[in-house]
Image (tube, grey):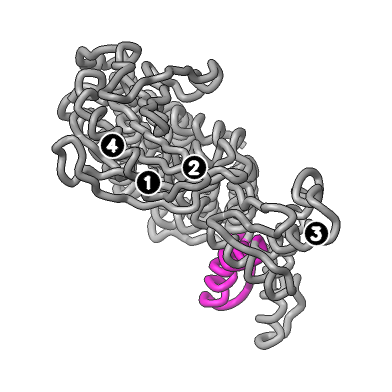
Amino acid sequence: MSLTQNQKWFLFALVLAFVAYFGGLSDLVSRWNTQEEYGHGYFIPLISIWFLWARKEALLASIGESSWVGPVLIAIGAVGLLLGELTAIFVLIQLSFLLTLIGLVLAYGGKSLLRVSLLPIAFLAFAIPLPYFLGAQLSWRLQLISSDLGVAFLRILGNSVYLEGNVIDLGIYKLQVVEACSGLRYLYPLLSIGFLMAYMYKGKLWQKIFIFLSTIPITVIMNSLRIAMVGVLVNRWGNDMADGFLHYFEGWIIFMVCLLILILEVVILEKIGQKRHFWQAVDVPVIQPVHPDKPESIVKKPLYVSIVLILVALIAVNLLSDRVEIKPERKPLATFPTKIDNWIAKESSLPKDVEEFLGVDDYLLADYKTGRDSVNFYVAYYASQRKGVSPHSPQVCMPGGGWIISSLDRITIDVAGKKDFHVNRTVINKDNHRQVVYYWFEQRGRHIANEYYMKWYLLLDSIQRNRTDGALVRVTAYIRPSESIEAADKRIQAFLEKSIPLLDTYVPK
């Protein structure tokens, strides 16, 4: 079948959109490759394409008069693309790409075509990972919930256990509920499956919503049962039960059980409702075409305007990549004082692969000691954050290093003559070791603890000041066995009192 002129222009616009949004889409694939909880992302576009192919006849019959709402949505998507490029928040680019797809459908076939194609496009949203700092916060909070519920289940089963943060003390073994045990690796794919099942279920709207939303408590509860099951196996057959193949095998079993519970929900709904067989209640709906009020127009001006808008966005992205940022003068962190009052430094360095992964332009990593007291001081400076390289939140890096976040708060301290100095304070543990960590972001004269604010000011300064430089500052104190957390807090604050005034010449305002 030969393509019409309008169809050729529509396909050209799609290819152009992929090129314009390539940076954000390539980051998407990278996340699928490196993060297990998003590995299902490869299947989402394939399922969406299958949806579109299954309803191809309805799509062709639903093409109507193009809508000027399309170019408006594409313009909004272009703004999101530029903001994402400026701030390196790739989720903005990815969501804007979906908005652009919707805009192109409207510009080509109008509202009638969108009604038939909206679900396959919307389903693509399940392929978009959360921003790193959001995913990290969700992960460690789910770890805490899973730990609490897991301990509750163990006690119900008659096991004597003690919980400290994310560490479940079984007496003979300390079970750490690490990032992999948060349940996210089940939650994200199960949400997409729940969406599909809700879509295919021939029930009422509230039943569809119930099936979809139920995936969240199902995942949390079943993951907690999994943790409790590991605890029972450790108590009965030894420590090896917590690691290795069985650990991952249990994970797959839990995922399949979660899926079976979703199926059971449909069966129960049918038992109290229409009493249909499962395969009668759940099936791919037959999509009827939405007959347009007006037939397809010969000249689709909104589609041509949309192509121009995408071209402008592509050119703007290329201009941004060639824009020379202002990089203020500063002293290299290698010259940071190794003696600060009574604090004497012993410098160290990051492994080369870690340094390359973080993408830092300059950094300081040193242990400062005075008497028996010591702290670890880390400053990571980035001359530009426009290319997607930005400070890695400790909320991401600490779990990646095997540390468990047992508490995370944003506190205000008075140090170095600065009032209302905001920092993130977290207590982490691994094995029998505990540490207190303070961290914040030094961003062009601002002391920022909130990562959302950090991204907001990054956007403003990239536009108003043509600067995206900044640094992450982190101070860590090891909690000695006989030491209180409060004593470690005082040690960090005593060090900050002396070190903060020195930062300005190394991290410029």
Foreground residue among 440 and 267? 440
Foreground residue among 472 and 292? 472
Front of the two marks 3 and 2: 2
Type of amino acid under label 4 = Ala
**Boundaries of the magenta span:** 194-223
Question: Circle 3: is it few (<14), some (14-19), or many (20+) Cα within 10 Å?
Answer: some
Q: Residue furthest bottom?
A: 272
Q: Secondary structure at mark 3?
A: helix
In the picture, the disc for residue 233 is 3
- Place residue 305 in its image quadrant: top left
First in sequence, mark 4 or 2: give its number: 2
In the picture, the disc for residue 487 is 1
Question: Circle 4: is it few (<14), some (14-19), or many (20+) Cα within 10 Å?
Answer: few
Quadrant (top left/top right/bottom left/bottom right) for the C terminus: top left
Q: Which residue is mark 4?
A: 494
Assess whether mark 2 and mark 4 are in contact (beta carbons under 8 angstroms).
no
User: Residue 322 location in percent, x, y?
Assistant: 30, 15
In the depicted structure, whether residue 25 falls above or below residue 320: below
